[in-house]
Amino acid sequence: MDKINLEEFRNIDMNPFDGALKLISGKWKMNLLFCLSEFDTMRYGEIKKTLGSITPHVLSVKLKELEANELIERHEYPQVPPKVEYTLTDKGRTLIPILRSICDWGKEYCVDFQDKQE
C-alpha cells in the first residue's frame, strides 16, 4: 500500500464538504428535509406528528435554520388561527437524491444496528 502524502492531503479543499455539512448536520435537519420531500407541503403540526419525539422548541429552531439556509420556504397565510406551511425550495430539492442514497445505504448496511435499537 502506498504511503499517504500528507502534503497532497493538506491541499484537499474541504470547504465545500464542511459547508454542506453545516447546512444539513444535526439530529433533525435531514429528517425534516426527507419528510418534506415525501409530503411536499406540510404544516407545523403535521411535521411534529410525523417526527414524533422532536420537541416544539427544537422543531421551530431547525425549521428557522433550514429557512435561513434557503433549503425550505415558509408560507404564512393571514387568517385566524394562523396557517403556516413549509415546502422545499429548489435548492432543498437538490439534496433529496443524496438523502435517498443515504436511506438506501442505511437499508443495506444498518439492519444490524436497527435490530439492536429495538
Image (cartoon, helix red, strand yellow):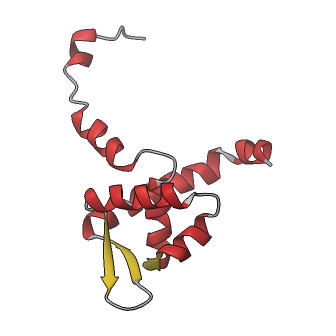
Instruction: Name the one closer to the observer, 54 or 109.
Output: 54
Instruction: Name the one closer to the observer, 29 or 93.
Output: 29
Quarter of the picture containing the N terminus is top left
Instruction: Name the one closer to the observer, 79 or 52.
Output: 79
- Residue 68 x/y as whole percent: 26, 58
Give the number of callouts.
0
Instruction: Name the one closer to the observer, 14 or 86.
Output: 86
State the residue at coordinates (50%, 68%): 35
- Residue 57 x/y as whole percent: 50, 57
- Residue 108 x/y as whole percent: 63, 50
25 on left or right of 52: left
Please say if 41 is above or below 60: below
State the residue at coordinates (51%, 47%): 27
Examine the rendering and report whether any part of residue 94 can be seen: no
55 on left or right of 18: right
**Res 98 → quadrant:** bottom left
Please say if 110 is above or below 99: above
Q: Residue furthest top?
A: 3
100 on left or right of 9: right
Please say if 99 is above or below 17: below
- Residue 71 x/y as whole percent: 30, 62
State the residue at coordinates (48%, 73%): 44
